[in-house]
């Protein structure tokens, strides 16, 4: 039995780190580009949608909140289906759902209808495409896994860098409805191409599967999960309100959207560079450091309304955010191994769903109640600080305990 398992492991290992593995990285990069480029460009749609429908900040931010809530909560289902049946079918379905949802949003005449077309369409579509493609990367790499995960995760940063200014340009010239149609058609085409090429990695099927109930009850998982909820609640506040904050202090629409692009651009550096940094600093230490950087950045946003300092805030937050999100799959693999990774990732990212559901709505309610954005920034700073405190006690011993069978799993 041991000889058979060893032979299988060697056979699987011989298929890893090759050209096909890098094709999977490319597909995951494109999926991240599309999903996060579209989702995080909502900040530039915020003002024109609110103005057309006469909606308040809380009501308009609900578009983003519903999308994020559905995206991340359904990720566990998408990850489980992908682990069992393979990623191709569910990624293809997601491509259609997301594209149709964006196009239908261009024809709404009531805000609540947009909650259905945009919230359900983009949310369900994103869940179907993102977790399955990210989860397969670990199973395709043995030697260069962290580098591959960093490059794949860089797609989210590139999307955040490029899509918001493109959307802002289209909105300025043609209106937000036309912009939604264009995004829907392009997204569906790109994601359908990814669905054609994705497949499960050879290492994903090897090793013993740890029961999911044991994973989610472990000390390491709970601490990581709580930290992610809190810090990501803070993160969603600038993604929704930073462009509106900037324009309220004299910035142009394009300059305001550029802040989201800058945030995404710095996220790219964090994602691509995290492989080398984790080897020097240590994966867990670097993860904690990324949460610290995120928390510290809100002090800059709170200190002044100067556009130059808003740029500094976007740079620092983007760097910390990029490192953190790129490290997360590697951290989960280190703790819990490769088998069932799609389901584990999906369950873990429900934390982001909770954050998306409460972050923008609470911040919008606070801003509406107080009449200024600074109270919303204070809320974000508090959440980010609590997220850091939640992760501080996590030790490498917890990683070894969570992944004590990791060498048999990978």
Image (cartoon, rainbow, N blue to C red):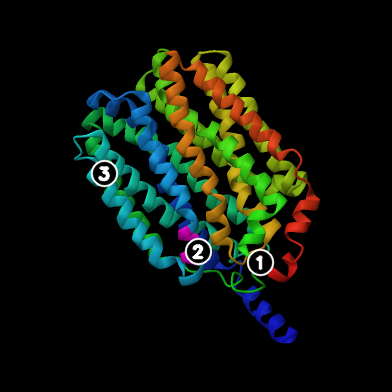
Tell me, for residue 80, which label it has, or none: 2
Per the image, the residue denoted by label 1 is: 210
Question: For this view, does 337 lie left or right of residue 74?
Answer: right
Assign a secondary structure to mark 1.
Answer: loop
- Asked whether disc 2 touches disc 3, contact meaning CB atoms under 8 Å apart, the reply is no
Seen from the viewer's position, the closer of residues 292 and 230 is 230
Seen from the viewer's position, the closer of residues 233 and 258 is 233
Would residue 26 be visible to someone looking at this image?
no
To which quarter of the image does residue 105 belong? top left
Question: For this view, does 6 lie left or right of residue 23?
Answer: right
Upstream in sequence: badge 2 or badge 1: 2
Tell me where residue 324 appears, x and y as whole percent: 62, 42
Check if residue 150 falls in the magenta segment: no
322, above or below 124, in the image: above
Tell me where residue 322 appears, x and y as whole percent: 58, 40
Tell me where residue 170 appears, x and y as whole percent: 27, 34
Upstream in sequence: badge 2 or badge 3: 2
- What secondary structure prevails in the magenta region? helix
Q: Residue at x 47, y 42 (%)?
A: 158
Assign a secondary structure to mark 2.
Answer: helix
Would residue 46 be visible to someone looking at this image?
yes
Tell me where residue 361 appears, x and y as whole percent: 43, 30
Magenta range is: 77-82
Question: For this view, does 63 lie left or right of residue 29?
Answer: left
To which quarter of the image does residue 313 belong? top right
Per the image, the residue denoted by label 3 is: 182
Q: Looking at the rendering, in which quadrant would you find the C terminus?
A: bottom right
Question: For this view, does 97 lie left or right of residue 392?
Answer: left
To which quarter of the image does residue 18 belong? bottom right
State the CA–CA distance, disc 2 to disc 1. Answer: 14 Å
């Amino acid at each position: 039995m041991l000889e058979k398992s060893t032979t299988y492991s060697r056979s699987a290992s011989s298929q890893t780190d090759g050209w096909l593995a890098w094709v999977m990285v490319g597909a995951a990069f494109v999926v991240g580009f599309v999903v996060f480029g579209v989702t995080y460009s909502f900040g530039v749609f915020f003002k024109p949608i609110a103005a057309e429908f006469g909606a308040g900040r809380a009501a308009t931010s609900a578009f983003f909140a519903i999308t994020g809530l559905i995206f991340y909560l359904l990720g566990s289902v998408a990850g489980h289906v992908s682990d069992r049946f393979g990623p191709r079918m569910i990624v293809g379905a997601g491509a259609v759902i997301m594209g149709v949802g964006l196009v239908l949003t261009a024809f709404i005449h009531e805000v609540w209808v947009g909650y259905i077309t945009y919230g359900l369409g983009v949310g369900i579509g994103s869940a179907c495409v993102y977790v399955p493609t990210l989860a397969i990367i670990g199973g395709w790499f043995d030697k260069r896994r962290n580098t591959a995960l960093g490059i794949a995760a860089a797609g989210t940063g590139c999307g955040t860098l490029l899509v918001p200014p493109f959307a802002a340009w289209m909105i300025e010239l043609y209106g937000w409805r036309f912009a939604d149609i264009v995004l829907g058609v392009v997204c569906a085409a790109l994601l359908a191409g990814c669905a054609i090429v994705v497949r499960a990695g050879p290492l994903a099927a090897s090793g013993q599967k740890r029961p999911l109930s044991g994973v989610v009850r472990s000390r390491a998982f709970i601490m990581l999960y709580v930290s992610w909820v809190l810090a990501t609640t803070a993160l969603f506040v600038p993604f929704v309100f930073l462009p509106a904050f900037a324009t309220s202090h004299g910035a142009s629409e394009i300059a305001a959207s550029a802040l989201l692009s800058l945030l995404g651009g710095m996220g790219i550096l964090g994602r691509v560079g995290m492989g080398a940094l984790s080897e020097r600093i240590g994966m867990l230490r670097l993860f904690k450091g990324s949460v610290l950087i995120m928390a510290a950045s809100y002090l800059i946003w709170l200190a002044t309304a100067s556009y130059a300092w808003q740029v500094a805030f976007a740079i620092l937050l983007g760097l910390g955010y990029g490192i953190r999100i790129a490290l997360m799959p590697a951290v989960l693999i280190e703790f819990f191994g490769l088998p069932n990774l799609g389901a584990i990732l999906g369950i873990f990212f429900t934390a982001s769903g909770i954050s998306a559901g409460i972050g923008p709505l609470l911040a919008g309610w606070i801003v509406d109640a107080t009449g200024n954005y600074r109270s919303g920034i204070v809320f974000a700073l508090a959440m980010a600080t609590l997220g850091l405190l939640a992760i501080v006690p996590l030790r490498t011993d917890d990683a070894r305990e969570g992944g004590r069978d990791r060498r048999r799993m990978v």
